[in-house]
Image (spheres, rainbow, N blue to C red):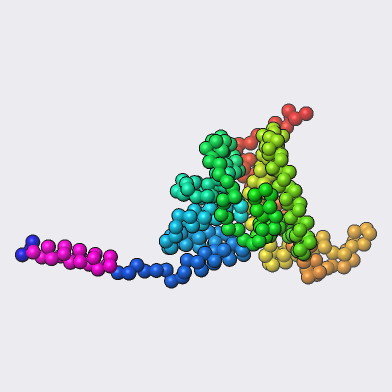
Amino acid sequence: MLRKNALLFIAGLLLAGVIISCQPESKPAIEGDKLREYAGALVNRSLYEQAIEVYDDYLEDYKVDKTEQANVNYIIADLYFERLNDYESALAYYLKVKHLYPESSLIDETNKKIVACLERLERSEDAQQALDEAVQLDPSDVQKKRPGEVVARIGKREITQGDLDFQISKLPPSVRDQFKTTEQKLNFLREYVATELLFDTAKRAGFDKDPEVIEGAFQAKKSLMVQKLLADRVAAKARVEEDDLELYYQAHKDDYAEKDEEGNIVREKSLQEVQEEVARDLTRKKYMDAYQAMIEKMLLTEDVQFFESRVQ
């Protein structure tokens, strides 16, 4: 009896499996083309991380051919490389294209981008090896989808309106405002192309291996890293609240008073009159206090010693 029940149970499981397998495969509620368009719209609005998420969902949820898979993975890699400057993530996706889709017409450009990623990650030996391994194909076969119309071409490399807008968006606000009209953008484009041409020429001339260039790049990198650290660890502590302004103003009221030639106070100014100046001074003080505290902590942690008597 037990054996019969066990057989019936197994048969039931098999039947259930057959029924489930015969059910029509559920389809995503949104058409793949629509999701692809949505991802492109996010890119055009500079929402690059969100676009990558949508592209990943598109690859996971929709059955697309290998050509499309390669193209989308390449787009994701480009977003990491050109827009987010996340070279490790970009490298991972470029390698995915190279190894999973070796027949793709994107392989030539992918190999070049792999080398560029490794160079930016300061892995020069790996970059040279990748360069040696690269398969040279016709770059004209590359099927890239970038936002906007092509506004310039350097050989076979295309620069689109999206590329132009992105480069302008990276400028400081005060400089960015100088490139709003079509003519101003054209001037920027010409300067950008000129810089790219000069860079390519300098690289072909071997200046990327020049000791002064290498040292200068290192110093620039060190400076940027320090700036990022200060922005992350110090600037956050220099934020000023409204209550802080009142307290600081009351403690330094005389510093903001109107004075005569001999330094005598003629009239006290209200906080409302000098609020911007007070905020600027307090922000500077809080920044310097946080900076000094961080440096003193580092001096102790790293056991730093100064030998002042030896300095000549």
* Residue at x 51% of width, y 57% of height: 72
Residue 21: x percent and y percent?
Answer: 28, 65
- Taking depth in this image into account, of 158 and 238 the one nearest to the observer is 158
* Residue at x 64% of width, y 57% of height: 236
Q: Is residue 31 above or below residue 75?
A: below
Q: Is residue 234 visible?
A: no
Q: Is residue 5 visible?
A: yes
Span colored in magenta = 4-22
- Taking depth in this image into account, of 299 and 60 the one nearest to the observer is 60
Q: Quadrant of the C terminus?
A: top right
Q: Choose top left, top right, bottom left or bottom right for residue 252.
A: bottom right
**How many numbered circles does the render carry?**
0
- Taking depth in this image into account, of 281 and 132 the one nearest to the observer is 132
Residue projecting furthest to the left: 1
Residue 307: x percent and y percent?
Answer: 70, 31
Asked whether residue 21 is drawn in magenta, I would say yes
* Residue at x 54% of width, y 67% of height: 38
Residue 88: x percent and y percent?
Answer: 54, 47
Q: Choose top left, top right, bottom left or bottom right for residue 125.
A: top right
Residue 93: x percent and y percent?
Answer: 51, 50
| Magenta region, main secondary structure | helix
Asked whether residue 148 is drawn in magenta, I would say no
Q: Quadrant of the N terminus?
A: bottom left
Q: Is residue 113 above or below residue 36?
A: above
Q: Choose top left, top right, bottom left or bottom right for residue 23.
A: bottom left
